[in-house]
Amino acid sequence: MHNHCPRFLNAAFFGLLIFGLWVPSAVYSKPPGEPNPIQYVVLEGGGPDQGPGPDVCKNMSALSERFGPVSASSDRMIAYGVQQLRILSRSTDVVRRDVNQALDLAERTGIPVFLHVDSCYGWGADSEKKQEDAPSAKFWQHPEMREWDRFPNGDQLQERVPRPWLHWGPWCSPAPAVAAFGSPTFVTFATSQLDEGVLLPVASRLRKWQRDGREYLFAGINIGWEAHFPNFGDPAMLRSIELAGGVVRAEYPRSARGVEMDRDFVGKQLGYASLHWRGWNEERLRLAAKQEGITRDVKFQQLCYESLHDFMETMAKACCDQGITADRVFTHIVALASVQNATTIRPPIWTAVNPYSTPGFTMDNRGGAKFDLAETVRQVRAANGNHDVHFGVVESYFNLGGRVYFNDTAECLSEIKAMFAAGARVQAFYGGFPLAANRIPKPALVAIEQWLSGNQAIAPEQRKGN
C-alpha cells in the first residue's frame, strides 16, 4: 500500500517492546536441535514504470557493495526484491527474461533475490513496445476475466466495465479493467503465466543452487499485491475523491497518465463477475443470505473473500507443484482487518492463509496500512490451526511520502527484531533505491547492519527443508 495518510506509532506498544515487557503469545521459538530458518530483510526496488530505482542490475550491485555478498552460513541475510513481474500484461518470454536476469545477478553478486509478481492489477497494460511482448490474452479485453459492478441481465454480460483506482499517494489506474479473481478463466490464465514465466525458470535454478549449496540465494516469491476487490463506495475512497475535487485523473502508470475516473462507477462495489462465474446470481445470493440469517451484503462479502482466498491458494499451489516450499511462497493482502472490520478492500486475515504458502501482509503503522501484530498472529493461528505462526512482512517502509520514519537506529532495530521474534520470515521494505540517493534513512541502514551482525552460524546443509 502506497497511501501517504498520516500514521501514529502506538507508543505504549513499543514502550513495552523496547523494555522487554511485551511478549506476544505467538512468538516463534524453534524446537530444540532444529536449525534456524533463514530470516531475510528485503529491499525491494521500483518496477519498470514505478518509482525510482528500476535498474535491477544497478540495484543489486549497490546492495553487494554496501553489505557485501551474504555468508552462506548465516541465518540472517539481506536480499533484493524485484518488483512488478508483469505476468498479466506481458508475454511469458518477457517475464522469463526478467526472472532469469534477477537469478543471474543473484549468482554473480551473492545477494539473494526475492520475486514480487503482479497477479492482481496488470500494471503496464497496453504499453508493450512490440506486439510479441503482449500476453497471450489481455484480461481487460476478455469478457470472462474482468470485473463488473452488477450481475448480468440474463445471458447479457456487462460490456461497460470499471477501471481500477488506487490512491497510493498519486492516483494510479493500472489497467482498463479489474481482474475477476473468481473467474476460472482468469485463474487458469494467471496460473499459466506464472508457471511459464516465473516458476519454471525458478525451479530449474533452485535445483542447480541446491546441488551447489546456494539455495539461500532464493529468498522467496510474493504471488500477490494487496489482493482485494475494489469498493468505490468505501468511505475512505469517497473522501479521497472529494479531496480531489470530484475529478480524479491517473498519474501512474505513465501509459494511463491523464485518464479520468468514470463518475458513474463512484459508489459501486465490484466482485459480481467473480461470483457470477462461480455460479451465483442475485436470487441465489439473497436466498443463501436469508437461510444463513445474515444480510445480502454480508453474504456478498463472504463470497468475495472465498474467491480471493481460492485464487491465492491456486497460485501458491502452482509454486508448490514446481517444488517451491511454502516457507518461500507468500500471499499478500493488507493487515487492516486486524484493527478494523473486514471489507472487500481490506480482506480478513484468513484469506491469506493456505497450506501452500506463508501469509504475507502490508504492515506499516506509520502510514495507511495499520495493523495489530498480536491480533494478526492470532487470526493466522486460528486459520491454520498451528501454534507456531509464520508470516511475511511483504510490504513496509523506512520512509514514505517525504516522511522519514526512523531517526533512531535502536528504535528501527527493535522493530525489525520484534517482527522476526513474532514469526516473520521476511521483512520487505519499499522505496529504497537508488541507494546512492540516500532514500533509506541512515539509522535504518545502520540498524540493518547491526541486525545482520547478530548472525548465528549454521551449516548450509542443515537448512534444507526449512
Image (tube, rainbow, N blue to C red):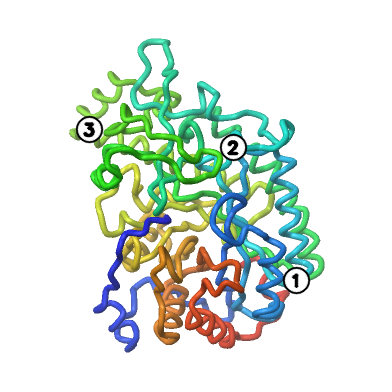
Query: Which numbered dot is residue 109?
Result: 1
Q: Between marks 1 and 3, how big is the CA–CA gap?
A: 57 Å
Residue 464 seen in the figure:
no
Kind of residue at badge 2: Ala
Query: Which numbered dot is residue 292?
Result: 3
Measuring from the top left, give residue 224's x and y in whole percent: 51, 49
Pointer 1 or 3: first along the chain: 1
> Measured along the vertical axis of the image, is residue 414 above or below residue 289?
below
In the rendered structure, the answer to whether residue 149 lies left or right of residue 116 reads: left
Measuring from the top left, give residue 286's x and y in whole percent: 24, 24
- Say which element carries label 3: helix
Q: How many marks?
A: 3
In the rendered structure, the answer to whether residue 368 lies left or right of residue 219 reads: left
Pointer 2 or 3: first along the chain: 2
Say which of marks 2 and 1 sits in front.
Answer: 1
> Measured along the vertical axis of the image, is residue 212 above or below residue 408?
above
Which quarter of the rendered picture does the N terminus lie within? Answer: bottom left
Residue designated by label 2? 190
Kind of residue at badge 3: Glu
Residue 73 seen in the figure:
yes
Which quadrant of the structure image shows residue 247?
top left
- Say which element carries label 2: helix
Q: Tell which of 206 and 78 is nearer to you.
A: 78
Q: Residue at x 25, y 51 (%)?
A: 341
